[in-house]
Amino acid sequence: MAVIDIGGYSVKALKKNKAYDFVLPVNCVGGTFTLPFADAKKLSHTLERVKKEARISECDLVLPDQWARQLFVKIVNDEPQADVNKDYVIWRSKDQIREEVYAGAKIDAHITSIETGDDKKQHISAYLCLVKYEILNKITDIFAENGIIINSIELSSHAVYNYLSSAGMLVEDFALLNIGYEVCTVYFFKNYQPVYVRIIETAGRHFENELKPSAAKEINSAETPEAFDAGIKQKEKNTMDLMSVKLFPDKADVSILEAFESKKSPVMDNFLKEIHLTFEFFASKFPQIRISKAFLSGGLCKNGGLDFFLSNFLSLEAVYASDRDKIQYLPLYAMKERQLHG
Amino acid sequence: MDKKINMNFFVERDSALKYSRSFIIARAVIISLPLLYIAYIAYCYFSYSSAYTKANERITELQDRLASRERELKNTRVVINDFDTFETMVKKGFFYDGETPFSDTLEISFTPELKEKTLKFEEAVAQSLKKTKTSERAIMESLFKNAGEFGGEVKIGNIKIDFSTKKMEFQMNCAAKDTYLRLVDNLKACRWIGQIFVSSLKASAGGVSAYIIITLKEAELFE
């Protein structure tokens, strides 16, 4: 069965080991958990191509991380429960989540630990994700209208984590930076389990807009397939321009570093500031955990130099989660492997 | 703990139902119904064709066997009892079609009285067969055939046949004496002639003229 990954930049598809990348029209997919949006007309325009070129009629779907609210809960039972499963955790967790957050959202859980403390009580830690029914229903309907049936829906970073796990690349404590087009998701893992997540709303699109500030204005706002295609071409050109620019220094060369320092880039400043703050916050919240390795994934990694730069910037070992030429397809490969191995 | 994070945010939607696997299967079945129907017709046609061919072969075989039986029957003597009705005879499988003489295929087990009658009947049949061979026409043909062997040397006229007295008379003129004698000898050999009398005979240089009277054999005569 095929896998489709909806990203902010494009819809990626994998069928029979062949990967496809269908760039989305401008302002097609975006928003956050609170206000997710997907333009039905524009997404349908892309899905028509998916259906026609990749000939997909059934798929497992991967959604962008920013459409989910990631939460970590701790549940304490005076009497240990023998059968602690997802449903039980979700049911118990609702006490700790505001109703306006979980109302109208589909919740799924991943149990990170079940321990019995010195107090003889059962301590359950879990990682919860919430996605609004509003966006799930809308996406399912748009896919159905285009003749594609969705069998399961997962989040992008989970798929990347599973890919690293299957590849045997995981270390006990590490960070995962999934730097996409709309957002950058930073996951922290302790003892292989997620403990903290932060979504930074500065990513590829912001660098692109900074590089070509007039690009957004140039794009035709008409709601026609021709206008969508023109927008896609413009978007592809802007991305190629961005990829040709060295955003991050890729070696310890004084002149390159000086040029990077002297270049005034509010987006870069904001991006680095957010990453720094995220790591600082994590270090203050979990002082006992020392993150020594960070895996990088997402489309912006194709720009290059990010591993070298972040290794120095964060004083840890930053490595790409895979070869850069296929890094944007990692969630697809992970989902495919899940299909094969159940 | 598990080193995989598996979550699923799948939602059931009516919109997806029409593209669900069951719907696709149902649609495929509906689309394929005409094809299935055509396939069914083709199957029936081939089955019928096969059965028809087999039936034809069977009929041919039976016809061959029947023909064989008929041939066999024609060479078989069928026993018919005197109390057999015609229907019984038919049931016994008597299919006489004229190729083989009736008497060759029929053996009759009759009572003595009936057997005697049958013998008389057979005799009568034999008599009637003889009569057909000794008619007036046969006598005349035989006479003129004997005369015709000498070409134009023999002339016959004033022929009279009287079956009641079993006599035949005619005037005969022959070109030579030798011809006359050979013709008389030839006539003596005919099975229907009893005796030959010459009532008058004139011989001259021009030939022999004779008036002949013949007595006919009764047993050989047709009325």
Image (tube, grey):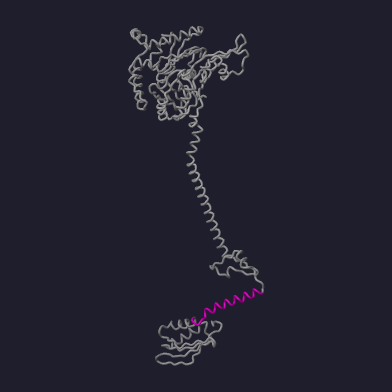
Dominant SS of magenta comes to: helix
Q: Residue at x 55, y 84 (%)?
A: B218
Residue B123 on the magenta segment: yes
The part of the chain drawn in magenta is: B113-137
Q: Looking at this view, is B106 or A206 the one in front? A: A206
Q: Residue at x 34, y 24 (%)?
A: A230
Q: Quadrant of the N terminus of chain B?
A: top right
Indicate the position of residue B28 as horizontal and vertical percent values.
Answer: 48, 36
Task: Reply above or below: B6 against B158.
Answer: above
Indicate the position of residue B188 as horizontal and vertical percent values.
Answer: 50, 84
**Count of all numbered marks drawn on residues in the image:** 0
Residue A257 on the magenta segment: no
Determine if residue B22 is in view.
yes
Q: Residue at x 57, y 61 (%)?
A: B69
Task: Reply above or below: B17 against B178.
Answer: above
Quarter of the rendering containing residue B71: bottom right
Q: Looking at this view, is A71 or A151 the one in front? A: A71
Indicate the position of residue A258 as horizontal and vertical percent values.
Answer: 34, 7
Q: Looking at this view, is A226 or A285 the one in front? A: A226
Q: Looking at this view, is A56 or A199 the one in front? A: A199
Quarter of the rendering containing residue B91: bottom right
Q: Residue furthest front?
A: A100
